[in-house]
Amino acid sequence: MKKQFKYIAIALAGYMLTTVFAGCKRSLELEPQDRVSDASFWKSTSEFKLAANGFYGYLRTFGQTNTLNDSRNATDLGADRGAFVRGTNTTVSDDGNYNNAYAWIRNCNYLLAKAANYPKPEEIKTYVAEAKFFRAYVYFDKLLTSYGGVILVKDVLTTESPELSAKRNTRDETIDFIIQDLEAAIADLPLESAILPGDKGRISKQAAQAFLGRVCLYEGTWQKFRAGNATRYNALLDKSIANSNAVIATNEYSLFKPAALGDSALKYLFILENQKSNPANITKAANKEYVLAVRYESNNLLRTIPGQISFGALGADMSRKMADMYLCSDGLPIDKTTTSFSRATLTSEFANRDNRMRYFMTMPNYRYWQNAANWHINWDWSPADLANARPAHDTWANGTTGYENQQWAAERQVPNFQEGYDYPVIRLAEVYLNYAEAVYERNGAISDADLDISLNLVRQRVNASMPKLSNALVTANGLSMQEEIRRERAVELQGEGFRFDDLKRWYIAHTELTKPMLGVHWTGTEYETIYSYTGTETPPPGLKKKPSITLDANGDVVVDPVTQRKFAEKNYLIPLPLKQIQLNPNLEQNKDWQ
């Protein structure tokens, strides 16, 4: 592991290890119980830098891409059937997400308090800015998107602090504080190009701008689709546009699309390592797309990927809705395409589609490579390489929908937990999509010129011959520009933890998450013909054992029936932990939760 990443791996080790208290003290964090004495710390710039290093452990990463374990990735695009997406979650006495968030906020506040007395503030302004960025990040990513408005803690608390018995701040107050912190951070953070090689991976000015663009798009649309104050939500959308555009305008980042990888570039972006991890032997140095990432290096015992990412990625279920999201090669959805779209065979619906479909999903009866036993031998698809591949892939071997994932599966020989690819917290593709959506929602329209500097760059990265999204294409084919912008976001960012929050801010979760979860079309297709053997012996040649499935009246596989899909108005926010309300009666529970 490179030296510059070691500090990011160590979350305040040796000086600010915060032990969380019980009850209200546990969540709002009064005093850390294990810390080197202040008398021997906070004396130099390097010590403020060391303190700020620990904040990087608050970022989303593998196995932690959501605040609620099953909420952000278990949506209408995957077959996971967690309580949050089903709307069957209940109130809880204690909540680790809530407690951790306030512990992390306390750490940020502590650095800021110490910085106020430092005699040379110019020397530490970058680390002060990082503390403000991460305080805003935690308030948004861990608290506001889950609970709505929360108690704002801006200083280090004592046992007499009024916040311990305060009412919750409003949603508007919470968002305004997040924006205030981010704008203050932006003023003092360095440009990406000014960050020294030994500090690469730290927060840049553009990362804070990109995150502010995300925050303001989220809240602007949240309010717009709930008949909020137009003046306020338009101001938020304006701020989202301005900050996303500021990142784009610097030209310091670019989409990852090496010519040597062709239309497989996006596939290999997610599993890019410094070891040979793709057929062109391109390393992470070529990736200029990640604006902010959690960085890993292979075989690093201090910072290992928290989960069997490669092992679990190849074969994880995806839904019929996800499959239907992919456009056809003529730039039109499957219900309007001029191509010969068909579900008749196992692979026919993959024909003439957005290339991301065949690189994010697995096709039946195709060979795939995986780290555990079926890695690439020499990356030349020679007989030896093909012989070591996973045999003709059966999408029903472990699945329930017939659609399976391959996005995060390493193709080189590497043990689980020791992959060296990075987790994209913010990447340029998202910034482009945030910009396009914010422009459209602000103005009710978007020009072709704006589409061409944003969304179309994302779409055509691996679909060079696909028609661009344009106003003429939308008008001529009876499409909805809003729907197509949302489609692009779903396709490009699938698997990165955005979908649940998107459904909530668009105020359509209560309609989309109450629909049944479907798999492949079965009746009258090759699936029904091939998977027809019901005996106990080895199936005869050409046939496979029929999986245990339920079909609806249309002959589609039903993975989760409508009776299990109960997402309602109250599920847009989760309940505050009951213990906090017991200890602070001035807290009010979220609507319709007891």
Image: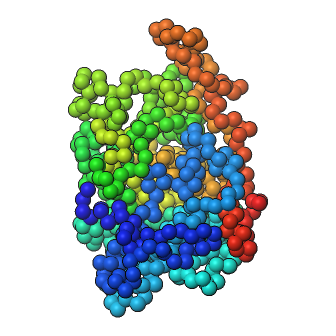
Residue at image point 58% right, 22% down = 547
Residue furthest to the bottom: 119
- Residue 547 appears in the picture as rendered: yes
Residue at image point 74% right, 38% down = 563
Quarter of the figure with the C terminus? bottom right
Query: 419 or 74: which is nearer to us?
Result: 419
Q: Where is residue 197 in the image (x, y as percent from the top left)?
A: 24, 66
Quarter of the figure with the N terminus? bottom left
Residue furthest to the top: 540
- Residue 502 appears in the picture as rendered: no
Q: Where is residue 59 in the image (x, y as percent from the top left)?
A: 45, 61
Q: Which colour scheme is used?
A: rainbow
In the image, residue 585 sits, relative to residue 10, either above or below, namely below
In the image, residue 572 sits, relative to residue 282, either above or below, namely below
Q: Is 306 on the left or on the right of 386, as rendered?
A: right
Residue at image point 59% right, 12% down = 534
Q: How many labels does the image show?
A: 0
Residue at image point 61% right, 60% down = 95
Q: Position of residue 274 (x, y in %)?
A: 25, 49
In the image, residue 242 sits, relative to residue 225, either above or below, namely below
Query: 385 or 233: which is nearer to us?
Result: 385
Q: Is 445 on the left or on the right of 36, as rendered?
A: right
Q: Position of residue 593 (x, y in %)?
A: 75, 59
